[in-house]
Image (cartoon, helix red, strand yellow):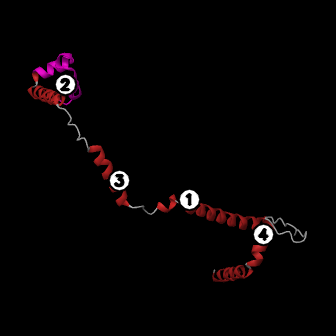
Amino acid sequence: MKCGKIREELMEAVLSGPELATPAVQEHLASCAACAEEIASLRRTMELLDEWQAPEPSPYFSARLRARLRDEHAQQGAGWLAWLRRPAVVTAAAALMAVGVGMLEGVHWKNTHPLDIAGYNPPVVNTGAAVSDLQYLDNHADLFSDFDALDDDQTEAN
């Protein structure tokens, strides 16, 4: 078996021990000196890690850390969004937004609802497609007359 294919099973052999490894892994370790040396090196590393003890922090570590964090926070400054923390500014901003939305809606409502002046309601004219087409033709008669002149020139040229 090739070393690359058995790599995952070798890690299981390191963690569980060579006697608990599959027969294929044990056979490969017996025949491959490089993999056997790698397993031995990994076992030595694991033994060293088992012996290692984390050092205890100094008794004033927490107090110094809190003081340093407090100093760093004070040096950062308020930032450009600090004004949002003030209730008066937030209330004024909300009021301005409400007034702006109200004005926009008022303009929209004014355009969609005709004024009722002293009980006068102007008749609502429902223009259909034919009426709007005739109005368009009437408004752009000059433009269409120029097109007619162009058509006349082309028929004379042929």
Q: Any magenta on residue 106?
A: no
In magenta, the rendered stretch is 1-30
Closer mark to the observer between disc 3 and disc 4: 3
User: What residue sits right under mark 2 in the picture?
Assistant: 14
Please name the amino acid that badge 4 sits on: Ser
Closer mark to the observer between disc 4 and disc 1: 1
Closer mark to the observer between disc 2 and disc 3: 3
User: What residue sits right under mark 3 in the picture?
Assistant: 70
Q: Residue at x 22, y 21 (%)?
A: 16
Q: Residue at x 80, y 67 (%)?
A: 130
Give the mark nearer the N terminus: 2 vs 3.
2
Please name the amino acid that badge 3 sits on: Arg
Q: Residue 35 location, x and y as percent?
A: 13, 27
SS state under label 4: helix
User: What residue sits right under mark 4 in the picture?
Assistant: 132
Q: Any magenta on residue 22?
A: yes
**Circles 1 and 3 in contact, beta carbons < 8 Å:** no
Up-down: is 101 above or below 137?
above
Crowding around mark 2 (Cα neighbors within 10 Å: few <14, some 14 to 19, many 20+) is some
Please name the amino acid that badge 1 sits on: Pro
Cα separation, mark 1 vs mark 3, equals 25 Å
User: What residue sits right under mark 1 in the picture?
Assistant: 87
Give the mark nearer the N terminus: 3 vs 4.
3
